[in-house]
């Protein structure tokens, strides 16, 4: 058999199975029922990216270089506040007794270990008094205060039970490529 006949038979098989499936489906569903289910499927597919799922990008996939307790650490290029690494927490987790604010500011930092730019999320940890250790004020990409969402000089302890500021964590959201 030549290739042309094999391709023709394959397309015939696909067409025939699609026709049979459509006929069987049309005998079981009305048009309204079909359109209703199709609408729900489309709506669900559109809402799927909004679900709170764990992203494929993990913090451990990033090559680290430098001292996490230094303001010169690459993750802190737009961080203003006290480092949670000096206050009993880590780069990505708040110290015990504090909670991360659900509201954050973002920045783009260059990682010298792999030469890539990363989108960073800076979350204030709230619920305890100020840590007062390892204070940094890095303003790379900072905007004037009238752009509150881009300013790192605002305390972001909104949406928490106790709005007192303690320290700030920096989490990698993904690459900026």
Image (cartoon, helix red, strand yellow):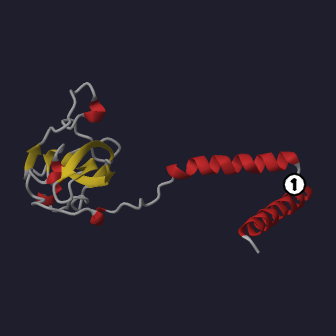
Location of residue 111 (image quadrant)? bottom left
Q: Is residue 117 above or below residue 13?
A: above
In this view, which residue lies farthest toward the top? 146
Quarter occupied by the N terminus: bottom right
**Left or right: 65, with 50 as reference point:** left
**Left or right: 51, with 83 as reference point:** right
- Viewer can see residue 45: yes
Q: Position of residue 163 (x, y in %)?
A: 26, 43
Q: Position of residue 133 (x, y in %)?
A: 7, 52
8 and 103: which is toward the camera: 8
144 and 109: which is toward the camera: 109
Mark 1 crowd level (few <14, some 14–19, many ≥20, 10 Å Cα): few
4 and 171: which is toward the camera: 4
Q: Which residue is mark 1?
A: 29
**Left or right: 159, with 46 as reference point:** left
Q: Is residue 56 above or below residue 136?
A: below
In this view, which residue lies farthest toward the bottom? 1
In this view, which residue lies farthest toward the right? 27
**Left or right: 69, with 146 as reference point:** left
**Residue under the image location 89 percent in, 55 percent down:** 26
**Residue under the image location 28 percent in, 31 percent down:** 148
**Residue under the image location 71 percent in, 69 percent down:** 3
Q: Position of residue 100 (x, y in %)?
A: 29, 52
Secondary structure, mark 1, is loop
Q: Position of residue 110 (x, y in %)?
A: 20, 49
**Residue under the image location 30 percent in, 34 percent down:** 149
- Viewer can see residue 129: no
């Amino acid at each position: 058999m030549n290739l042309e006949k094999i391709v023709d038979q394959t397309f015939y098989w696909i067409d025939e199975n699609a026709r049979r499936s459509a006929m069987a489906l049309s005998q079981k569903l009305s048009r309204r029922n079909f359109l209703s289910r199709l609408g729900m499927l489309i709506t669900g597919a559109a809402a799927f990216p909004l679900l709170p799922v764990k992203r494929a990008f993990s913090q451990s996939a990033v090559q680290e270089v430098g001292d996490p307790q230094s303001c010169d650490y690459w993750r802190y290029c737009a961080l203003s506040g006290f480092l949670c690494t000096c206050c009993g927490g880590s780069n990505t987790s708040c110290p015990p007794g504090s909670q991360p604010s659900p509201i954050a500011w973002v920045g783009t930092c260059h990682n010298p270990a792999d030469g890539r730019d990363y989108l960073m999320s800076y979350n204030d940890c709230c619920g305890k008094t100020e840590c007062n250790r390892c204070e940094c004020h890095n303003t790379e990409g900072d905007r004037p205060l009238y752009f509150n969402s881009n300013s790192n000089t605002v305390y972001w302890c909104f949406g928490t039970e106790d709005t007192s500021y303690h320290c700030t964590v920096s989490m990698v959201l993904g690459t900026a490529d």
